[in-house]
Image: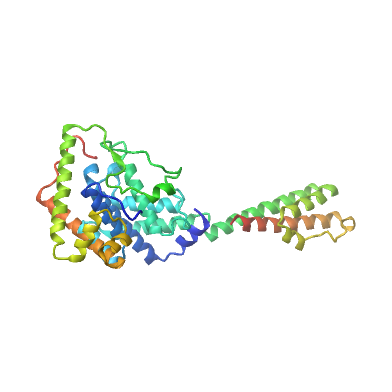
């Protein structure tokens, strides 16, 4: 609000006083008095609104429990995809391509930590490559979930 | 809702919420009383709303993310929620069952939040954002009656402040257009805490004077225009 603003009429003055008064410090008892003076029971407003507040906070996608559920679903989906791939027996070339693509999705420092560049993939069995890919996808999904937050 | 807002809101204790809810409820109650000439009642508002339900709705709109509170641009949650309450009253005044006055189109974003430039020069919800379509003679008479009533309250308030130099100084500074505690304090030589306390006392006085006057001369209700 600007420091200076001419008033239009008495109603403007009353609303300005209301706004400035609302920004002052009030005790809970003083606030309740304002309701009681108007014949309103403040406890019904308090109870209903507090219940609404708690429900919205609990149901928010940002609540830790809802985040954990979302992450769990995401990881489950990733595991199911891995299982499906295993049962489909992807060709070796595609397994290697997927490993490279998953490493590329990760931030460079994470990718470097998990880098399998030193490995001689030629010596890895298809089964080993599948395991490496599953692990990398798991880490990449976890990392993406953290980045989303 | 953004992460920072959620962390602040979910970190608030029940006692903090209780105080905020009561503070907003009181603000809505008084705003409603100041708008009563438009809504015909400070208790029953258009659309079956009450002042308390408007306060509650403002909080829920922020919690549900319908109003996007950004603690970085609006660090004071209470003030932000009061702006939301003003906006909700503005919508009620402009509602289907309360078309006596119309609201000038505001510069708001898609969530109904005031745009930063307008926030800086935010109009008080009492009158400034309203313009009047042509009124019937009866409506004009009602408005004159309400203005007269407000002038009466103002006269009584000024008289009531005679014995209290702090209240008188604050009132005079506001008559001169000072609109913030800081500006009023600079004008009057009072501290901002004294200015805030004076505003609380003024507000309580207005409420009791309004009530006293209503008991002495109830507002005539315009036939066929009540909010039912």
Residue B213: % across, % down: 13, 52
Q: Which quarter of the rendered picture does the C terminus of chain B lie within?
A: top left
Residue B149: % across, % down: 15, 47
Residue extending furthest left?
A: B216
Towards the viewer: A102 or B147: B147
Towards the viewer: B16 or A22: A22
Report the residue at 76% width, 49% height from top.
A85
Taking the image as shown, residue B205 lies to the left or right of residue A85, namely left
Towards the viewer: A60 or A85: A60
- Total marks placed: 0
B9 in relation to B51, above or below: below
Taking the image as shown, residue B201 lies to the left or right of residue B61, namely left
Residue A135: % across, % down: 74, 58
- Scheme of colours in the image: rainbow
Residue extending furthest right?
A: A123
Report the residue at 14% width, 65% height from top.
B163
Asked if residue B156 shows in the view, the reply is yes
Residue B53: % across, % down: 32, 51
Report the residue at 41% width, 42% height from top.
B107
Asked if residue B22 shows in the view, the reply is no
């Amino acid at each position: 609000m600007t420091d200076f603003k001419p008033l239009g009429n008495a109603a403007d003055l009353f609303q300005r006083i209301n706004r400035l008064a609302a920004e002052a410090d009030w005790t809970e008892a003083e606030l309740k008095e304002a309701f009681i003076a108007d014949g309103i029971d403040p406890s019904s407003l308090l109870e209903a609104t507090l219940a609404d507040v708690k429900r919205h906070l609990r149901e928010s996608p940002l609540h830790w429990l809802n985040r954990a559920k979302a992450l769990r679903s995401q990881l489950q989906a990733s595991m199911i995809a891995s299982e499906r791939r295993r049962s489909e027996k992807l060709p070796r070339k595609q397994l290697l391509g997927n490993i490279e693509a998953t490493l590329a999705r990760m931030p460079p420092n994470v990718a470097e930590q998990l880098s399998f560049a030193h490995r001689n993939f030629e010596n890895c069995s298809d089964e080993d490559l599948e395991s490496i890919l599953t692990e990398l996808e798991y880490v990449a999904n976890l990392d993406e979930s953290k980045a989303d937050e | 809702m953004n992460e920072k807002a959620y962390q602040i809101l979910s970190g608030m204790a029940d006692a903090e919420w209780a105080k905020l809810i009561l503070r907003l409820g009181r603000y809505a109650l008084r705003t409603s009383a100041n708008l009563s000439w438009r809504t015909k009642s400070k208790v029953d508002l258009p659309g079956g709303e009450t002042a308390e339900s408007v306060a509650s709705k403002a909080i829920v709109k922020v919690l549900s993310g319908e109003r996007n509170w950004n603690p970085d641009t609006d660090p004071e949650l209470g003030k932000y929620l009061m702006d939301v309450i003003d906006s909700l009253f503005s919508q009620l005044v402009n509602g289907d069952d309360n078309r006596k006055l119309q609201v000038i189109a505001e510069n708001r974003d898609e969530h109904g939040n005031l745009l930063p430039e307008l926030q800086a020069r935010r109009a008080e919800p009492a009158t400034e954002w309203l313009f009047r379509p042509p009124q019937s003679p009866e409506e004009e008479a009602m408005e004159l009656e309400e203005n007269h009533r407000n002038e009466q309250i103002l006269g009584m308030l000024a008289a009531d402040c005679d014995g209290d130099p702090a209240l008188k100084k604050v009132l005079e500074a506001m008559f001169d257009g000072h609109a913030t505690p800081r500006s009023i304090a600079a004008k009057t030589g009072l501290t901002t805490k004294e200015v805030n306390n004076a505003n609380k006392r003024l507000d309580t006085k207005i409420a009791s004077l309004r009530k006293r006057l209503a008991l002495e001369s109830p507002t005539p209700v315009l036939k066929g225009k009540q909010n039912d």
